[in-house]
Image: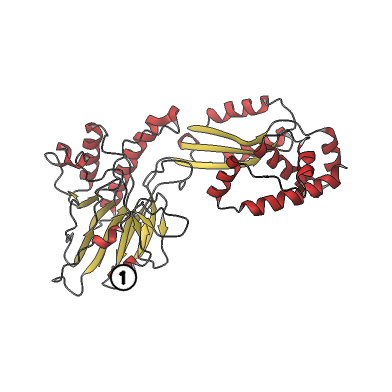
Amino acid sequence: MVSFLHTADWQIGMKASQVPTVAETVRKARLTAAEQLMRIASQREVDFVLIAGDLFENNLVHNEAAHRVTEALSACSPIPVYVLPGNHDPLTEDSIYNRSAFKDYLPPNVHILRTFEPVAPVPGVMLLPAPVMSKESFDDPTTQFRIPPEMGEDSIIIGIAHGSLRIPGKFQENDFPIALDAAKRLGLDYLALGHWHSFYVHDDERTVYAGTHEPTGFDEQRKGTVAHVTIEARGSLPKIERLDTGTLSWQTLKCDVSGDPAHVVSHIKHEVSKVENPSSTLLRLELKGHAQSDDLQWLEDLEDWLKIRLLYIEIDKTQFVTRPIGKRLSKLAAGNPFLQSIISDLVDIAYALGRPIEDLPEDLANILGSDSQIIDDRLQDDLDRWGIQSEDVEEALRTLASIAEEVLS
């Protein structure tokens, strides 16, 4: 039996420019989470620790950061730690792993996987590494695994690589694409991957992304994670336990602001009151809908209230329309959920096209049955990114125009 921790994508030294006012706090949190992970390794008495790439943000981080990382990794000694270079810190000529911190001062329990040669971390286990040598590649890194012919039949085989599984819509051809059947094809008991920052276990139950130990943004998992993996014997399915390691929480709250501002504020305050550790929480508040008034003092006051309770607050207003709906539309929609829904859709389209809501129905009616282009280049780029067919959008707009014409005639 073998027991180990699988982690990746620490990206120590990241600038955290997306949250500038707390960037230093975010950077320090990554080291704090790393120290927590090493304590877990010691407490659980694992056989070794695998870091599947991107230990650092890039090869240009300060020497102090390099020494702090090696110091953190030494905390679980004598448990060995195996570090695979990733696409953020590849084994190029200027690699951070060529500095003295990883040569002259490297702790004895820390090992940098610099070659494709197999490694035996403990008796009865074979580790197959695929270190990254460049920022991008069209090649599957798992094709570089080298299984020694003299390896025992009962040896547990673990691959470690950095790249993107070839899941349609979730990878790019130059992003170290990894075949979905790599583990099965190569006879691996476990394939430890890095590069994706969220915890993910593939269908084969052997191919795993452990996720980052501390999230780097709002679009990732809310908390940092590590995988504790136990494999009973050669051919056995791994037992994979997801553990929390992060010190910060990145959360997103979506809110429709079309109603009474007092109710909107009350709802947001109620949701924030449920946050477990507000002083360690970064929150993105996504506002959607149409304000009843141009007076947004309530929003300014709310933001001030949030700032003193949370570590960081970001308010996204890209889907928030502040021009009041005209009296005619308001009167028509009063007490009619169907018409309210139509007006909400009209507001969304008005925002996308940059036109006043009162003018939009006439604009839509004018294009009804016409051959003019409805989708401009800017909107087409967005549709391509979202995977939406422009023909479907045009048909929806024409249908909505017909309804709007009847409602407002």
**Front-lying residue, 329 or 68:** 329
* Closer to us: 388 or 255: 388
Left of 408 or right of it: where is 90?
left
Q: Position of residue 286 (x, y in %)?
A: 59, 39
Percent position of residue 288, x then y: 65, 39
From this view, report whether residue 328 is shown above or below residue 345.
Answer: above
Q: Position of residue 265 (x, y in %)?
A: 66, 34
Q: Quadrant of residue 266?
A: top right
Task: Determine whether, in the image, residue 124 is placed left or right of residue 57.
Answer: left
Quadrant in the rendering for residue 152: bottom left
Taking the image as drawn, is residue 140 in sight?
A: yes
Name the residue at 31% across, 72% down.
236
The amino acid beneath tag 1 is Arg
Residue 337 in sight here: no
Q: Residue furthest left?
A: 104
- Quick one: quadrant of the N terminus? bottom left
Residue at the spot of label 1: 185
Residue farthest to the right? 409
Q: Is residue 202 left or right of residue 382?
A: left
Task: Residue at 86% x, 47% y: name it.
Answer: 406
- Front residue of 392 and 235: 392
